[in-house]
Structure formats: C-alpha cells, structure tokens
Image: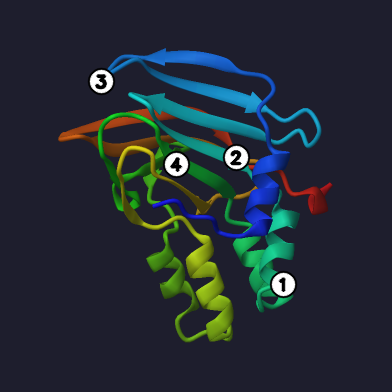
Amino acid sequence: MHRHPGKSYAFRLQRIRPLVWLGLMLPGWSSAAVVTGVDEQSGLRSWEWREAGASIRLVQRLPDQTRAFFQARGFSVAEADRIASECVFQTIFRNDGQYPLTYALDDWRILHRGERRSLLTRERWDEIWRGGQAGKAARIALHWSLLPTRQRFEPGDYNWGMSSFGLQPGSSFDLEIVVTLDRDTISRSISGIECARDLQEN
C-alpha cells in the first residue's frame, strides 16, 4: 500500500527536512521516542513519534499554504480560509517495523487549555460542509487530501495526508495517539505541538 497523493505533497516532503533533532524517550512497548525538528529554510517545525519501527510525523503547514492549496481545488476564498484557520499539519505514517499497525483517529485526543477534544476528521468536515455552498468537487478534494480516519499498515507500508486539529494558528497542544501494533494497543502522548502562525496576522 504505497500511496503517493501527488506532486504537491512530494514537493512539501522534499522541502521540509528536519535538520535539528531533539529526542525524548518514552516508557512503553519498545524503544519509544518523540523527536522534534526544524527546517532551516522554512522555519517550519515537526514532531515525530517512533516506536518498534513505526513512525508518525506531524509537519507544520502555514495557513497560506493551505489557503492556496484549497482555493486551487475549487473552494472560495472564505471557505479556504476556514480550512486554513483550523491548524492543519502534514502527517506522514510509516511502518518500517515487523508488525502490522492500525489506527483510528476517532480514538485520538487533543489536549488544549485543560480541555480534551477530537480531531477534525474527514467525516467531521463532511458534516461542516453539508448544506453549504462548497461544490462537490471541492469537497471531494478536501476529503482525499485529509489523512484517512482509519487505516491498517503492513510492514513496509506508508501514507501521508493533511490532519486538522481545530485550533487557532499559533496554538499549542498535546496529542494523545492510540495505535495497535501487532495485537497490542498502545497510547502515547506528544507534548508541546504548535500550530503554525498565520503570517496574514502579522
């Protein structure tokens, strides 16, 4: 299951290479770690969980990047701004380990200012646009641009897509992720994730 969302995503992945890494060891299943990176050219930051050969990497997307992406796919300026203002990250999953990995984003939780909330998944965005003015083609483009809500990765599989956290640009939050490795369900926390700031506000 080697999926390539397109040239625009490949360009993002080439541009955002973590050049500064800091490690934080976590107790658990097998040599777990969370590392952070900063791209020297763009200044965009990333957070990556690694365990037993599996990894989940979150890379900041500037709101302007997201606005341009979705305006080019049929959303109006206001609609694209709505998406861009909801703390969008590029999210990369890899399973380079020996065990199958499954996840369901509905099980993940955002911790922000003492509150727990869910991610804005494909299904939640479908509800937001239901009955609105956004065209069908634009809504389909958003649906397939977002990370699948549920997925299974065999060893060697990888995929990427956008994830939306429903927070204002510049917000900080912790993320509780839940995955199943082989037959073991594990929960991990990635702390201090920061939504990219909106350059239009400066």
Provide the residue designation for mark 3.
29
Q: Residues within 10 Å of mark 4 (few under 14, many from 20)?
A: many
Q: Residues within 10 Å of mark 3 (few under 14, many from 20)?
A: few
Q: Amino acid at mark 2?
A: Val
Give the residue drawn at x 42%, y 13%.
25
For the residues bearing labels 1 and 2, Cβ distance under 8 angstroms: no
Q: Where is residue 162 shown, x and y percent of the image?
A: 54, 53
What is the CA distance from the residue labelled 4 to the residue labelled 2? 12 Å
Local SS, label 1 = loop
Provide the residue designation for mark 4.
93
For the residues bearing labels 4 and 2, Cβ distance under 8 angstroms: no
In the picture, the disc for residue 72 is 1
Comes first in the chain, label 3 or label 2? 3
What is the CA distance from the residue labelled 3 to the residue labelled 4? 18 Å
For the residues bearing labels 1 and 3, Cβ distance under 8 angstroms: no
Q: Amino acid at mark 3?
A: Trp
Q: Nearer the viewer, residue 68 or 161?
A: 161
Q: Where is residue 52 shown, x and y percent of the image?
A: 33, 24
Local SS, label 4 = strand
Local SS, label 3 = loop
In the visual, does 138 lie left or right of 56? right
